Amino acid sequence: MNTLKLFLLVGVLSLGSVACSDTARTSTAAPDSTEATTEAPDAEAAEESKEDATGAIRRDQLNSDIRAREERNNITGGDADRSDSDLASEVRSKLEANLPASALLIEVQDANVTISGTVPTQEQFDRIEPLAKEIKGVQSVVVKATVAPATPDPEG
């Protein structure tokens, strides 16, 4: 019985540490860290990401998530009390909903947001910082992303 309790405790703690990550990604093609070299996603991955982000259901989910977090924040009055992981998740939702085909990694430390990865156009790049700053509780935004249109698939 004690072994089972230990196993469950380790499982819960492991899940908790993964769930409390202060990073978030707009797509699976996003880099692993803000220090990683960014490369343009292949055309197929970029198209899948764009279709997912621009789909009506996904866009509604993202916007609903943003509204729910903002409402919760307004009710609690907790602008200064927002966790880094909550800010990372909300910034990710905001960027994913508004920058289709992006591959961005969002890291937050002490309410300071760092965004790296790629976007397909300069117009999207120019929107990264203003969109991130719309999230209540974000203190500053550093954009390390680059403009990199998707590359054609050499096998396609």
Image (cartoon, helix red, strand yellow):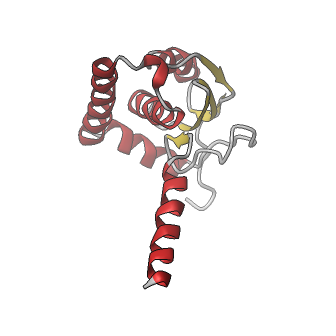
Q: Which image quarter: residue 146?
A: top right
85 or 66: which is nearer to us? Answer: 85
Could you tell me which residue is drawn at 30 percent across and 35 percent down? 59
* Image location (x, y in percent) of residue 139: 57, 16
Question: Can residue 49 be seen here?
Answer: yes
Q: Is residue 139 above or below residue 23?
A: above
For this orientation, the residue located farthest to the front is 2
76 or 21: which is nearer to us?
A: 76
Q: Viewer-proximal residue, 59 or 34?
A: 34
Answer yes or no: is residue 136 visible: no
Q: Which quarter of the rendered picture does the N terminus lie within?
A: bottom left
Q: Tell me the quarter of the image containing the C terminus.
A: bottom right
Instruction: Tell me how many marks there are.
Output: 0
147 left or right of 69? right
- Residue at x-position 49% and y-position 76%: 7
- Residue 98: x %, y % from top left: 41, 27
> Residue 17: where, in percent of width, then height?
55, 54
**Residue depicted at 51% across the width and 14% down the height:** 130
Is the residue 13 above or below the residue 48 in the image? below
Tell me where residue 57 sits by quadrant.
Answer: top left
Which residue: 44% across, 20% down?
135
Q: Position of residue 29 (x, y in %)?
A: 57, 49
